[in-house]
Amino acid sequence: MNFFGQKEEKPAGPDPLFAATTEMEMYTFLFNRMSQTCFEKCLNRKHKEGDLALGEMSCTDRCVAKFLEAQEKVGVILQKANEQQVAQQANMQNMQQSFNR
Amino acid sequence: MEAVQNLPPHQQAEFMVKLEQMQMKDSLVMYTNLVHRCFAPCVTSFRSKVLEKTEQSCVENCASRYIKLTQRVGLRFAEHQAMLQKRAEQAASAGTQA
C-alpha cells in the first residue's frame, strides 16, 4: 500500500532505503493518528475504570475499520487530482511548444 | 508494506537501525502526548499542588485505557493489512491465470 492506499509499481528512481523509511514513517503516523482519533471518539472521558468497556471495544473496532476505509477513499481522490494535474501540465507544455514553433 | 518488504539485503541492516531510532522517538512522542491527553480531562482543580485521589485514579485509568486501546487498534490494523495482502495475492494469481 503506497501513500494513496493503492498498489504501486516498482519505482525506478528513489533509493529503496528512503522509500522503506518513509513508508514506515507513514504507517507510524497513521497508527498514532488513528489511535488518537478513536480514543477521542470512543472512550468516555470520565475514566472511572482501568479497562475498556464492551461498548468502547466495539466502537474502537468500527472506528479503525471506518478510518482505514476513509483513508482509502481520500487516497483515490488525491490520486485522481494528481493525475489531472500531471495531464494539465503536459497540455501546457504541448501548447507552449506549438507556440514556439 | 511493499517498500519495506522489497528492501535489498545490503540495506536491511541500515533499515533496522533506522527503525529502532524511529521506535525510540515514537515512544517518547507517545509519552508526552499521553500525559497531555490524560491531564486535560482528569485534572480540573488547582486547589492544591498535589493530585487529588480522584484525579490520580483518573490519570492512571486514562493511561491504562489508552495503552489497551492502542493494542486493540494495532490488532485490527494488522488484520486489515492481512486482508489487503490476501486480496492482492488473489488479484495477482487471478491475473496470471487469465
Image (cartoon, grey):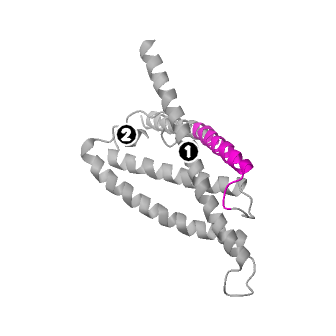
Residue at the limit of the structure toward the left, as seen here: B10
- Which residue is located at x 59 percent, y 38 percent? A72
Q: Are marks 1 and 2 on the same chain?
A: yes
Secondary structure at numbered mark 2: helix
Closer-to-camera residue (B9/A89): B9
Magenta run includes residue A82 = no
What residue is pinned by disc 1? B75
Image location (x, y in percent) of residue A52: 68, 54
Secondary structure at numbered mark 1: helix
- Which residue is located at x 38 percent, y 34 percent? A10
Closer-to-camera residue (B6/A95): B6
Image location (x, y in percent) of residue A77: 61, 38
Magenta extent: A50-76
Tell me, for residue B5, which label it has, or none: 2
- Give the main secondary structure, helix, strand or loop, of the magenta stretch: helix
Residue A15 visible from this viewpoint: no
Name the subunit of mark 1.
Answer: B
Image location (x, y in percent) of residue B98: 46, 12
Q: Earlier in the sequence, mark 1 or mark 2?
A: 2
Residue at the limit of the structure toward the top, as seen here: B98
Closer-to-camera residue (A85/A68): A68
Q: Nearer the viewer, mark 1 or mark 2?
A: 1
Q: Amino acid at mark 2?
A: Gln
